[in-house]
Image (spheres, rainbow, N blue to C red):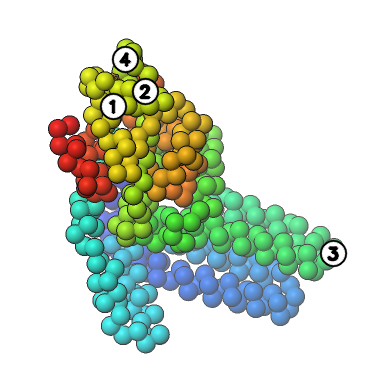
Amino acid sequence: MITKAMKGILLKIRSSKTAFWSGVALLIINPPLGWVGFLIGGYLSAKYENPKYMFIATIIYAITWGMAGMGLLLAGPKGVALAQNFFKKISAKVFHRSGNIDEKNINNNRNTSNSTDIEQNREEIASERVWGKAPFLLISWLAYITLALFLMATFYLAEPRLFQISHTAAYIVGAIFAIAIITLGGGLLLITLTSITGMDLLYPHGKTQITMRILPPVVYLLGTSIFRLDKDKLRESFVAVSNALFWAQAIKNRFSAKRLLILLPHCIQWHKCPWKITWSIENCRKCNKCPLGKLVDLHGKSGISIYVATGGTVARRVVMEARPTMILAVACPRDLSEGMVDVYPIPVYGILLSRPNGPCFDTYLEIEKVRKFLKIFRPDVYSLTENW
Ligand code: SF4
């Protein structure tokens, strides 16, 4: 309901041409404004030995984040692409890199067929009847703005006392606060842009990003306590964002599925099955009363391992032992969202379980999603799935 309402509001806002171009203008103006303001504030602060200039600069910088967010909402992915193109052209002129943009694009798209395949399948695989990315991203920005304002207010109130103690201490504390605000904001902006546009703007690639570890608990706390949202729905939204980041990076071939781990929950097994498969899936007798009957043949094939975990602790141990290069995880919103944070930065694609019989009882996996995933990342074993 809320996602639909949000989408409706967004569509209405974006339907106006003025709104679109205003959004593009905000996206173009905010980076130079933020950085120039920050540099001038830093310069004045150092020259007059007064941290108030730094404080004002930080406020300007925080406002430019708001401008970026507003620009994103107004202009949408098309506007982001236009603004990016604008900056590319400017930087090409400034650094005399004429003609490089097109060549770069061609080089970046060297694996076009694979990228197209991924693009085509992304929407199909991710077509889940669950919350999308918007709630998680919106509450993340709200949390970030609240935190940034809190840090700025704290510094503003503590600054006279800090100066009485020591000028150096005041500068160090101010710098720490500023770095925290910039790092978290930068990380969140990259996550937002990547998950909305599908372009991999994350940096550093494949490294642990502090923002992605910090955000989920803060968003769940804010979302449930202030907006009274369902925690599981927020977790679904987090999984949608995580999956979007996964695909954006997969298109750029940043991952290898050489050692692919498929992690399944024990509740996927038919409740009357007499065979214990939590330690070894090979005990399955392939009666096909549950999805394991089809999946079992993949276990042990060319670097693919399949494990059925009874809980988060077992899943973590399995990941440590298998040392996978990629994980396909199937679980409920809670286990999936927690697991994705735990194993970060190992790339994880998450598939949410269907629970037609209630939680943890004869749960259901849309096996077709696994097939499509294998078709892209492990075409060498795809033939084994033809009879599924
Ligand atoms: S497919 Fe395997 S795990 Fe599932 S019910 Fe049949 S024997 Fe048990």
Label 1, ligand 1: CB separation under 8 Å: yes
Residue tagged by mark 2? Answer: 277
Give whichever of discs 4 and 3 has the lower sequence position.
Answer: 3
Q: Residues within 10 Å of mark 3 (few under 14, many from 20)?
A: few
Amino acid type indicated by mark 2 = Ile
The N terminus sits in image quarter: top left
Identity, as a three-letter code, of the amino acid under mark 1: Leu
Q: In the drawing, what numbered circle is on residue 273?
A: 4
Which residue is rendered at x = 29% and y = 74% of the image?
Answer: 104
Question: How far is mark 1 from mark 2, CA to CA?
Answer: 9 Å
* Few, some or many residues within 10 Å of mark 2 (<14, 14–19, 20+): some
Amino acid type assigned to the residue bearing label 3 in the image: Gln
Residue at (78, 68) in percent of width and height: 168
* Furthest residue toward right: 165
Which dot, 1 or 2, sits closer to the camera?
Answer: 2
Give the percent coordinates (x, y) of residue 302. Answer: 29, 44
Dot 1 corresponds to which residue?
A: 292
Image point 36% across, 58% down: which residue? Answer: 254
Quadrant containing the C terminus is top left
Question: Is the residue under label 4 in contact with that under label 2 (CB below 8 Å)?
Answer: yes
Identified by mark 4, the residue type is Cys
Position in image of residue 94 (x %, y %) = 40, 85
Ligand 1 closer than 8 Å to label 2 CB: yes
